[in-house]
């Protein structure tokens, strides 16, 4: 069985049109890295770019780099690089701050764009916790009430009291993919605004923000976008909302004329309005360089490989692992699956430690979930087979 | 005259106990860099440290670095490195986010710590604009009213309606230093909380946050602290307020047990409560390395040199520059002077361009202010003399 699956992996890798992308990353063959859904691997050319930013742009040009090296316009320029990966036309995405800070901007702005008589913010009850904490603060500060709802029940939960709904595209724990088109439509039918968190989907599958008329969205860049640890997040504001986008964090770099340094705030036009303070250049330009790996790669090809990888991993797990030892929390249906496989396992902390010891790096979500992220740009079918094989040996 | 002042500069440099610090920075003798109050120069050892963070910590250790490389605790660890530079005991400073975002946290938190019947937030009317914009948003979201006041008149302006006052320690435009001890005392006598912005003072002069019982403070790290372009800012929350500190941005990394990932928010104890999202590691660890230049340097010695440098620069300007061509906006009294000299000049944009062309790098604040920042760790008296000489030649 093991030999058959290993052969099958080799055949799948040989036919993989994205196989060539792996060499763009600093990876060693000793490790199967299945934690790119937490921290993406280092693109191999990024260190040289960062060194140039530090030594030449900062060290030699110093203050001149704000203009000459394009530092000042980095947030919107890099936003435009991310835009095609999330199905957005240019001019709607700005990079900066953490995901949490962007959730705050997006939820408060959504409430302010909504009918002011509406009293509720519906929040994905299964969300990554920061979204819930921040939405709660946004609700408190705008005089609204939080209504936590399982995304599967969201369509029935939104209504005439809903100002906005904040939903995760892919659940961080189970890898469950929520149906962005139909949920966005349901939120709109209720007369509310749809805010999507793309942390676990952008870079792993097509998002289609413009096509599905999403209102606002946020996402991080250090998972499938490989921007580096804690790299800046992004904010999408649909063009039709930009004129009325009213940020709770109107920092000076979102001013229409920042260097006039006038006491009165006058917001810039466009996505720039989502900026806040001075952009964090080292992290931002590392991210910009990291995005080069997407040149010529289509989100559709990435999605096809992601599904093939997770299908194959599940097949290997089912073949290798004794029945009953793990329970798959990730939906089988392609339409409901992100790019990770979450397995519930009784002694998950011990198992994950042992896996990491043996070179198979996933992660643990307490108390009992093993997470395996499949980054289509650099994970191979051979990696998937090896991970299942090592998992089986660890569980036997 | 020029020869006398050049000799005097040489004598002052020879006697300068901080002269040895200059070699810690990547500086060339062709340039007189007087813009460290906008972007500090690169400490020479930072590129190697950043390269190690990128190649080894991110590229090789990957996800393990959150624990093994100390990434997770960087915000509070680096906060403790900054603490002595602003007169704070450990455990009260946390690094992360931009200054603007930290102003929002600090002002909202101050309002929440204040007597809820108080209706006003007093804001330094001469402040760097982002503080005013953000304070206005904080006021709007907490139901308070902004009262803009010149810091010179603050003592008479705070009263029983004041919840909090936000003041800049050094005015970014004129270099005027405000009297932190007496203003903090006046704010406290009015029963309000004092929030200080240290962007233009930290690293240039002693601040004494604990000694003067400041309540909350924020500051950037890319000016006199040389952290790099857009490096993360910091937030100081006095220990006595930490238990009641109620952040408007309660992100997951400020949770008491972040990896429990529970839907209910429960804040951590201590300065950690000021954290928000995932820390921006590349920028943060560049900053941490940059702080090494402060080892063995006392803020008092820095202040003494700063005053000597600005005194000497003014003396050179008065000797060299034709009378009436520039007007000094920076107070002469040491007690009211930060670490920069601001000169008003009729054709300031042309003059600053010409100065930069000739290797004297200051900056312009529209419409007519030439700013010259004096960073005691790397600016010499010879630099000050040369800058004044070149300025004079440009103006003749």
Image (cartoon, coloured by chain):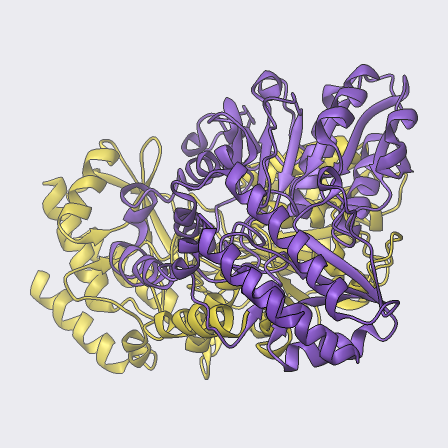
Chain colours: A purple, B yellow
Q: Nearer the viewer, residue B376 or A265?
A: A265
Q: Nearer the viewer, residue A105 or A162?
A: A162
Q: Position of residue B298 (x, y in %)?
A: 48, 78
In the rendered view of the protein, which quadrant contains the N terminus of chain A? bottom right
Name the quadrant containing residue B387.
bottom left
Q: Nearer the viewer, residue A248 or B61?
A: B61
Q: Is residue B189 left or right of residue B329?
A: right
Residue A200's place in the image compared with B120, above or below, is below
Q: Position of residue B150 (x, y in %)?
A: 58, 38
* Residue at x 64%, y 75% (from the top left corner): B67
Residue A146's place in the image compared with B63, above or below, is above
Q: Position of residue A184 (x, y in %)?
A: 74, 25
* Residue at x 62%, y 73% (from the top left corner): A360
Residue B75's place in the image compared with A269, above or below, is below
Q: Is residue A152 left or right of residue B181?
A: right
Res A203 visible: no
Q: Position of residue A147 (x, y in %)?
A: 91, 35
* Residue at x 78%, y 51% (from the top left corner): A330
In the rendered view of the protein, which quadrant contains the C terminus of chain A? bottom right
Q: How many marks?
A: 0
Q: Is residue A364 left or right of residue B8?
A: right
* Residue at x 18%, y 71% (from the top left corner): B8
Residue B14's place in the image compared with A8, above or below, is below
Res A222 visible: yes
Q: Nearer the viewer, residue A69 or A358?
A: A358
Name the quadrant containing residue A346.
bottom right
């Amino acid at each position: 069985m093991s030999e058959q699956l290993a052969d099958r992996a080799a055949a799948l890798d040989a036919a993989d049109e994205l196989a060539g992308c792996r060499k763009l990353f600093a990876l060693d063959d000793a490790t199967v890295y299945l934690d790119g859904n937490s921290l993406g691997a280092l693109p191999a050319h990024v260190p040289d770019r960062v060194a140039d930013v530090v030594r030449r742009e900062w060290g030699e040009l110093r203050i001149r780099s704000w203009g000459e090296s394009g530092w000042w316009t980095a947030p919107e320029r890099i936003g435009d690089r991310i835009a095609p990966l999330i199905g957005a036309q240019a001019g709607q995405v700005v990079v900066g701050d953490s995901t949490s800070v962007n959730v705050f901007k997006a939820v408060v702005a959504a409430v302010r764009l909504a009918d002011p008589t509406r009293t509720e913010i519906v929040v994905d009850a299964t969300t990554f916790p920061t979204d819930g904490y921040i939405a709660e603060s946004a609700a408190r500060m705008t005089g609204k009430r939080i209504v936590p709802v399982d995304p599967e029940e969201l369509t029935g939960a939104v209504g005439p009291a809903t100002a906005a709904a904040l939903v995760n595209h892919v659940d961080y724990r189970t890898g469950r993919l929520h149906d962005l088109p139909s949920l966005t439509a349901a939120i709109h039918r209720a007369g509310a605004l749809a805010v999507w968190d793309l942390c676990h989907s952008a870079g792993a599958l097509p998002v289609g923000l413009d096509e599905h008329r999403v209102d606002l969205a946020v996402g991080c860049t250090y998972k499938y976008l490989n921007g580096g640890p804690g790299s800046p997040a992004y904010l999408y504001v649909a063009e039709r909302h930009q004129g009325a986008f009213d940020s709770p964090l109107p920092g000076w770099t979102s001013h229409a004329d920042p260097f006039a340094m006038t006491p009165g705030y006058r917001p810039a036009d466009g996505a720039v309005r989502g900026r806040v303070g001075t952009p964090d250049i080292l992290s931002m330009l590392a991210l910009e360089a990291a995005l080069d790996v997407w040149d010529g790669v289509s989100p559709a090809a990435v999605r096809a490989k992601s599904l093939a990888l997770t299908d194959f991993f599940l097949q290997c797990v089912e073949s290798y692992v004794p029945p009953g030892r793990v329970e798959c929390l990730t939906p089988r249906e392609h339409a409901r699956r992100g790019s990770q496989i979450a397995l519930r396992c009784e002694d998950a902390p011990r198992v994950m430690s042992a896996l990491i010891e043996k070179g198979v790096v996933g992660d643990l979500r307490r108390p009992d979930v093993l997470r395996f992220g499949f980054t289509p740009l650099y994970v191979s079918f051979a990696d998937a087979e090896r991970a299942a094989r090592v998992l089986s040996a660890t569980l036997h």
